[in-house]
Amino acid sequence: MAEVYQRAQAELTTSFATVYTVPGATSSVVIGCRISNIGSSSVNVEIKVGASGSTKRIIGVATPLPVGSSLSALSGDKLILEAGEIVEAICSSANSADLIISVLEIT
């Protein structure tokens, strides 16, 4: 089995956007997920995970993020994703939050 560390990042908008997709024949361990407020006002952020085109599971519903702050969406926990699953995120104000995800892909 090969193991490769990867990073995905996005500037969030007011529509859910795919930030990371697990490649085929791969499992991924999300080892970090940091969201930073880069805007000039407080925002709410939300992250969902699951298979593309199906019901997603929410990690933090409308989580408040004050100006100039950041948070870890996993707080030391790990998240296992299977081939084809995606991570999506949204922000209450366009271009006001950055999201960075660190993963270990196992093939």
Image (cartoon, helix red, strand yellow):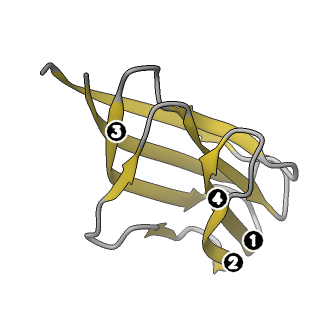
Disc 3 + disc 4, Cβ < 8 Å: no
| Separation of marks 2 and 1 at Cα, in angstroms | 12 Å
Q: Quadrant of residue 3?
A: top left
Local packing at callout 3 (Cα closer than 10 Å; few below 14, some 14-19, many 20+) is many
Residue 36 vertical placement versus 52 (above, below): below
Residue at x 63%, y 65% (from the top left corner): 57
Alpha-carbon span between mark 3 and mark 4: 15 Å
At label 3, which amino acid type do we have?
Ser
Quarter of the image for the N terminus: give it.
top left
Q: Which residue is labeled 2 in the image?
A: 61
Gap between marks 2 and 4 measured at Cα: 9 Å
**Image location (x, y in percent) of residue 4:** 21, 23
| Circle 3: element type | strand
Q: Dot 2: within a 10 Å radius of its alpha carbon, few (fewer than 14), some, or many (20 or more) residues? A: few
Q: Of the numbered discs in the image, which one, if any, rests on residue 48?
A: 4
Give the residue at x 64% y 72%: 67
Q: Which residue is mark 1?
A: 43
* Mark positioned earlier in the residue sequence (4 or 1): 1
Q: Give the image location of residue 17, x and y in percent.
A: 75, 41
Indicate left or right for 77 with 44 as reference.
left
Secondary structure beneath dot 1 equals strand
Identify which amino acid the numbered label 2 is placed on.
Val
**Label 3: which residue?**
28
Work out how far the residue at label 1 is from the one at label 3, CA to CA, in angstroms. Answer: 29 Å
